[in-house]
């Protein structure tokens, strides 16, 4: 079974798409975003899925997209902000190199914009974003091998931090030469 070299999770505005594409380039591998997979499968943008079929239908499409991508994609994978809400998805992520890109509200608002077509942020986006983070932060942390704050950092700096956090620690070395007495 092929599994992703790296999985990014985090809220809207964390930079998963930007950082994911940059990491894929640096690692010489492909980049995949499950939200894009969902839109391709449904044949319409995510906001329209929410309006036309509702959130439960979207979440089922999301579960399927994550399962498929985790099984097929050997590169960098970015998950939609709410994917971790599903217990099956969290179980699927166990043991994978998952990084939670953490972002503060002010940075998320600046990156996403309050008028962006994000269905769960449509009414009172600042308040709703805080509520989503309250519910999701423990789940992002649960699945993550590393938590990287994106605040005040360029995409390149965040990518560096991700790679550093996932770099294996060198094994301790033992000097086997005899010391002069």
Image (cartoon, grey):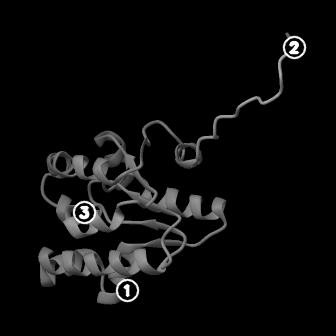
Single out the mark in the foreground, 2 or 3.
2
Single out the mark in the foreground, 2 or 1.
2
- Residue 8: image x %, image y %? 42, 58
Crowdedness near tag 1: few (<14), some (14–19) or many (≥20) residues, C-alpha within 10 Å: few
Secondary structure of the residue carrying tag 2 is loop
Single out the mark in the foreground, 3 or 1.
3
Q: CA distance from mark 2 to mark 3?
A: 61 Å
Crowdedness near tag 3: few (<14), some (14–19) or many (≥20) residues, C-alpha within 10 Å: many
Residue 158's place in the image compared with 10, above or below, is: above
Q: CA distance from mark 2 to mark 1?
A: 69 Å
Secondary structure of the residue carrying tag 3 is loop
Query: Residue tagged by mark 2?
Result: 180
Q: Of callouts 3 and 1, which one flags the residue occurring earlier in the amino acid sequence?
A: 1
Q: CA distance from mark 3 to mark 1?
A: 18 Å
55 and 1: which one is in front? 1
- Residue 110: image x %, image y %? 36, 47
Asked if marks 2 and 3 touch (Cβ < 8 Å), the reply is no
Q: Of all residues shown, which one is farthest toward the top?
A: 181
- Residue 181: image x %, image y %? 85, 9
Compared across the picture, whether 131 is left or right of 143 comes to left
Secondary structure of the residue carrying tag 1 is helix
Q: Residue at x 12, y 76 (%)?
A: 56
Query: Residue tagged by mark 3?
Result: 82
Query: Residue tagged by mark 1?
Result: 40
Compared across the picture, whether 51 is left or right of 43 comes to left
Q: Of callouts 2 and 3, which one flags the residue occurring earlier in the amino acid sequence?
A: 3
């Amino acid at each position: 079974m092929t599994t992703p070299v790296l999985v990014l999770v985090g809220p809207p505005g964390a930079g998963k798409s930007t950082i994911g594409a940059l990491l894929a380039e640096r690692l010489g591998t492909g980049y995949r975003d499950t939200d894009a997979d969902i839109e391709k499968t449904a044949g319409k943008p995510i906001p329209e899925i929410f309006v036309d079929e509702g959130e439960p239908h979207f979440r089922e499409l999301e579960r399927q997209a994550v399962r498929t991508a985790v099984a097929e994609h050997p590169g960098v994978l970015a998950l939609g902000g709410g994917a971790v809400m599903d217990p099956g998805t969290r179980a699927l992520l166990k043991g994978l190199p998952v990084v939670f890109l953490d972002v503060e509200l002010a940075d998320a608002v600046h990156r996403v914009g309050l008028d962006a077509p994000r269905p769960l942020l449509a009414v009172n986006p600042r308040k709703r974003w805080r509520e989503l983070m309250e519910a999701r932060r423990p789940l992002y942390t649960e699945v993550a091998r590393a938590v990287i704050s994106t605040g005040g950092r360029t995409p390149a700096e965040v990518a560096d931090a991700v790679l550093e956090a996932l770099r294996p620690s060198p094994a301790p070395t033992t000097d086997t030469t005899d010391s002069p007495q």
